[in-house]
Amino acid sequence: MTSLYSHAGGDEALHRLEEIFYAKVLEDPLLKQLFPERRATHVDHLTWFTVESFGGPDRFTREVGFDHLIQVHRHLDITDEQRERFVELYMEAFDEAGLPADEPFREAVREHLEFGSRVAQQNSRAAADDDLHPLRAVPQWTWREPGQSGS
């Protein structure tokens, strides 16, 4: 089975995607409050997370750690509109970055975004640790690539 990471084009393609996406959120009126300034490490961290989640090297876990991700979302109070705009801009960036356009891959990426943005939103609203989403590690996202039979 081909990983999402390999199908996407590896580190270079995913870094290109995250660069385009990050530029979009920094300029978006709705998301600027969540991304108020460019941070030197943000694109790399986004890339490492996506790479690892899509089946590539585990650099995010080794060098950043999942707890960092939880903490940066705490108290942001992400709205439904912001969460939906995040997904929308990511899919725009996906197209602009020239990633494979086949529907099974696009659907897997969208499902990943929907799941991840809901986890981030829950964590952003957590008043106490018990309110956090139970996820404590980078999720390993898989897909049913074209030609693969169902079970």
Image (cartoon, grey):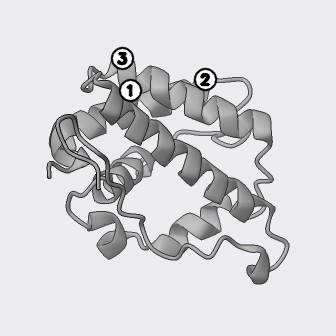
Quarter of the image that includes the C terminus: bottom left
| Kind of residue sitting beneath label 2 | Glu
Image position, residue 148 (x, y; %): 19, 43
User: Which of the two discs, 2 and 3, labels the residue nearer the N terminus?
Assistant: 2
Image position, residue 51 (x, y; %): 28, 52
Using the numbered discs, state the Cα–Cα distance from disc 1 to disc 3 in whole angstroms. 6 Å
Which image quarter: residue 36? top right
Front residue of 136/22: it is 136
Front residue of 144/4: it is 144
Q: Residues within 10 Å of mark 3 (few under 14, many from 20)?
A: few
Which image quarter: residue 104? top left
- Say the numbered circle drawn on residue 94: 1
- Say the numbered circle drawn on residue 96: 3
Q: Residues within 10 Å of mark 1 (few under 14, many from 20)?
A: many
Secondary structure of the residue carrying tag 2 is helix
Front residue of 14/22: it is 14
Q: Residues within 10 Å of mark 2 (few under 14, many from 20)?
A: few
Image position, residue 125 (x, y; %): 80, 61
Whether label 1 touches label 3, CB < 8 Å: yes
| Kind of residue sitting beneath label 3 | Glu
**Direction from residue 119 to residue 48 in the image, left or right:** left
Using the numbered discs, state the Cα–Cα distance from disc 2 to disc 3 in whole angstroms. 16 Å
Residue at position x 60%, y 23% in the image: 27
- Residue at label 2? 27
Q: Nearer the viewer, mark 2 or mark 1?
A: 1
| Kind of residue sitting beneath label 1 | Phe
Residue at position x 35%, y 63% in the image: 140
